[in-house]
Image: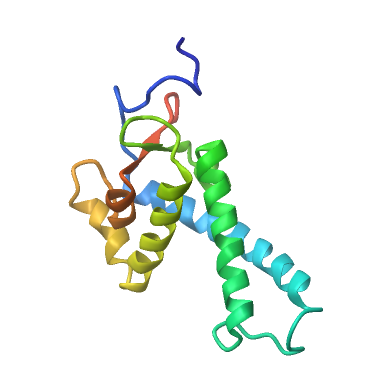
């Protein structure tokens, strides 16, 4: 059956370019900022009255869990984040199937390392023939352009 959600986009794939990937990341960072503000408000009644990320361990862990919940749920269930949706990008495993929870977690953790390494893990997409970053290589995922997306 060849509908948009069940077909295997890896067969006739247009891999996501780095500029498109970066624009989706920009969109997601704006959305994530709002999500983290709400998560911070939820955390206010608990623990220390003064909450500062990276100074309060529990608050920092809470924010990391919230970040993973956003990305992991989007990747696992919608196969794209809201930023990826805006730029017609879908994430698939190397087999073309939806990404499993363990792969989502691995992708999230290696993605954080990729960004912490001054973005080198993301820029790796410039030299990979399938435009994959370190996080894609580690989790065996691909970002593909949805068919019908304009250049």
Of the 4 image quadrants, the one containing the C terminus is top left
Residue located at (36% from left, 50% from top): 19
Q: Residue furthest top?
A: 1
Residue located at (42% from left, 25% from top): 147
* Picture layout, residue 91 above or below residue 108: above
The quadrant where residue 93 appears? top left
Q: Is residue 81 visible?
A: no
Q: Is residue 98 visible?
A: yes
Q: Give the number of callouts.
A: 0
Residue 136 % position (x, y): 32, 49
Residue 78 % position (x, y): 56, 37
Residue 63 % position (x, y): 60, 70
Residue located at (77% from left, 69% from top): 42
Residue 21 % position (x, y): 40, 49
Q: How is the image coloured?
A: rainbow
* Picture layout, residue 55 above or below residue 86: below
Say whether residue 113 is left or right of residue 87: left
* Picture layout, residue 103 above or below residue 36: above
Say whether residue 117 is left or right of residue 70: left
Q: Residue furthest front?
A: 102
Residue located at (58% from left, 83% from top): 57
């Amino acid at each position: 059956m060849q509908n948009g959600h069940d077909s295997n986009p890896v067969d006739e794939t247009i891999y996501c370019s780095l500029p498109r990937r970066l624009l989706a990341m920009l969109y997601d960072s704006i959305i994530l900022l709002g999500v983290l503000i709400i998560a911070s408000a939820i955390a206010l009644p608990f623990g220390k009255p003064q909450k500062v990320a990276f100074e309060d361990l529990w608050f920092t862990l809470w924010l990391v869990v919230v970040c993973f919940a956003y990305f992991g749920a989007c990747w696992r269930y919608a196969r794209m984040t809201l930023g990826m949706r805006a730029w017609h990008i879908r994430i698939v495993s190397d087999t073309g199937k939806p990404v499993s929870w363990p792969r989502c977690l691995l992708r999230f953790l290696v993605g954080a390392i990729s960004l912490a390494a001054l973005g080198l893990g993301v820029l790796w997409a410039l030299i990979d023939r399938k435009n994959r970053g370190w996080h894609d290589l580690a989790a065996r995922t691909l970002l593909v352009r949805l068919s019908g997306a304009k250049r």
